Amino acid sequence: MADHHPEKNGLSSPQEEHTQYPNGISGSATHAEFGGNELSHPRAQGIFHELHSHDYANGRETVIEESPSGRYAKLNTVLGKGAYKVVYKAIDREEGYEVAWNCFQTTKAEFNDLSLEIKILKQVRHPNIINFHDYWYKDAEFIFVTELMTSGTLREYIRKLSLPNMKIVKRWSRQILKGLIYLHSHNPPIIHRDIKCDNIFINGAHGEVKIGDMGTAKMKLGKKYTVIGTPEFMAPEMYEEKGYSEKVDIYAFGMCLLEMVTGEYPYIECENAPQVYKKVTSGIKPESLKRVQNPDILDLIMHCLDPENERYTAQQIMEHRFLAVEPEVVLLTANSAKTQLTLQVVFKGMDKLSVKFVFNVEKDTAEQVVNEMIEEKVLKNQYRQLVTHEINRILRDINKSTSEDESNKEEHKTSWPAQAATPPFQAGASPHIPPQRSHAHVPPLLDRDSPNSTLSQQQIVIDPQIQPSRKNSFSGGHATECTQDSDDEIPVKEYPDNSPIDEFVREAALATNKDPEKANEWSEKLKSQDIMTVGDLRTLKDEDWQGIGLTVFAMRALKNSLRGKKLRSQTSAISL
Ligand SMILES: Nc1ncnc2c1ncn2[C@@H]1O[C@H](COP(=O)(O)OP(=O)(O)OP(=O)(O)O)[C@@H](O)[C@H]1O
């Protein structure tokens, strides 16, 4: 088990975490020893104060300063002091919220130099990144107002919890990664450059985790040559003056994860920053890595610490088996005969990410449909068994409920007068399908389903935070499509019997956002069965269709087009 004795780590209270490194060195002042060009920065001299989280004057909070606009009122309560800045509680008079008033000592020239980054910071908006509200320069201080976090830093939390359990580690990690995915998805990417457990903040009441201290983040305009960060969390390439990319944040995230699961500051075995530097640059990993027992976590951390060119992206880390979210399948609607079901694969904790599809009880099998989803890359192979099992569970429930309905009808026939029929499978209608499964996670777009929907495409609900969307991106790994519901169906031209099969297939594929390559694949299969025209296709019986070797998806797309309908498509893409 991890060694987590504050005394041993040289840390007896959260206060000291900022005044003394576990190595016995002082905060970011250690950057000086690596020849960084930030040495003249007043921050690098280290401002170490005794920390009082509530510094009341006369025992009560009072306003001691106002922002130039008058909107923000600084209170006499110190939330915390770091090596470089003092943070006060403040009030947003316009919104009535409490906010954090950050005072950062710097020269006017340095403030001006940072102006571009600061402007960018003001535009950064993500639920896992501390909101930056306003800023100004006054009396040798860069003052900025940010969202206030109520429960301290991740590092303090790790201490409080001793060692957080795996569920918490996963939840925290996913939130940090969502923030990083967002930052790195900017063009050019925003690099935080100082990710560490002290810079990740918690709102305990809701278990929210947000990346803070964005002051060091800079846009990657070409390669950067500035050494800045915290030695133990700095990727080797940050020490080399050759430039680095957003992957430095992934390395630092790996170190955070290591700290979360061992409760130990990485490279605690080093006595000073040069020792850390020597180890990092010669590829020696922190000792605490040996204490990571869970092989999945170890594998994940190793991917974060890999050399820059092999290192995972934030998105790849999110998809790693340790963090991947297990899907469940929910029943959305069914027709009155309970033969046509609209099901949805939901990835809990992945916001609104889900895959929706129609299941024909008489014709489809769970195995077949899951296979199709994997083939179409809307579902990863790793979920094959689980999703198949989930669909079969729903089918069993339906079977059971149908037989019970039948026997109830029999009973009613003999002992009760006819009752008003309850439409089956509406929210909570069936005693065998838990009500929360009926419409859980269905955003408004999908609520328009009619119980008799003939929708026959997989659908995905896009996390609105992930931008921009890509079109027609089935070929791109885990991309999926978003197709509107059946009430958006629009008629297309009727195909005469002598229409060439290639043209028909191409249009059917297009209507379901398949690329021309896919259309060719379908055409080839049809032509190999001597199906050369739409007329040939029309003569096929159900059993003939099965013999062509098309996926269920392809068959549905073609059959829909054959009926003279196509689905109006709107696409976006996202990775699962
Ligand atoms: N948004 C916030 N909400 C609540 N408390 C905050 C917030 N930002 C900072 N603090 C408190 O102020 C302390 C100092 O902030 P921070 O650690 O960011 O200072 P720093 O000098 O920039 O960083 P460091 O010393 O880690 O390099 C934090 O430890 C925390 O207790």
Image (cartoon, helix red, strand yellow):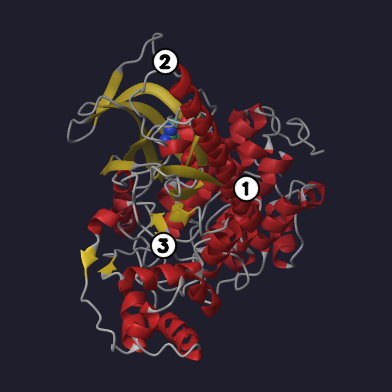
Question: From the viewer's perspective, is 322 left or right of 103?
Answer: right
Give the image quarter of residue 27: top right
Residue at 43% x, 61% y is 574
SS state under label 3: loop
The x, y position of residue 251, in whole percent, is: 61, 59
Q: Which residue is mark 1?
A: 256
Q: Which residue is mark 3?
A: 185
Residue at 46% x, 85% y is 526
Counting other residues with Cα less than 10 Å from the Cα at mark 3, is it few (<14), some (14-19), or many (20 or more)? some
* Front disc: 1 or 2: 1
Q: Image quadrant for the N terminus?
A: top right
SS state under label 2: loop
* Front disc: 2 or 3: 3
Question: From the viewer's perspective, is 149 left or right of 495?
Answer: right
Question: From the viewer's perspective, is 262 left or right of 200?
Answer: right
Residue 393 can be seen in this image:
yes
In the rendered structure, are the residues bearing label 2 and label 3 in contact, judged by CB atoms less than 8 Å apart? no
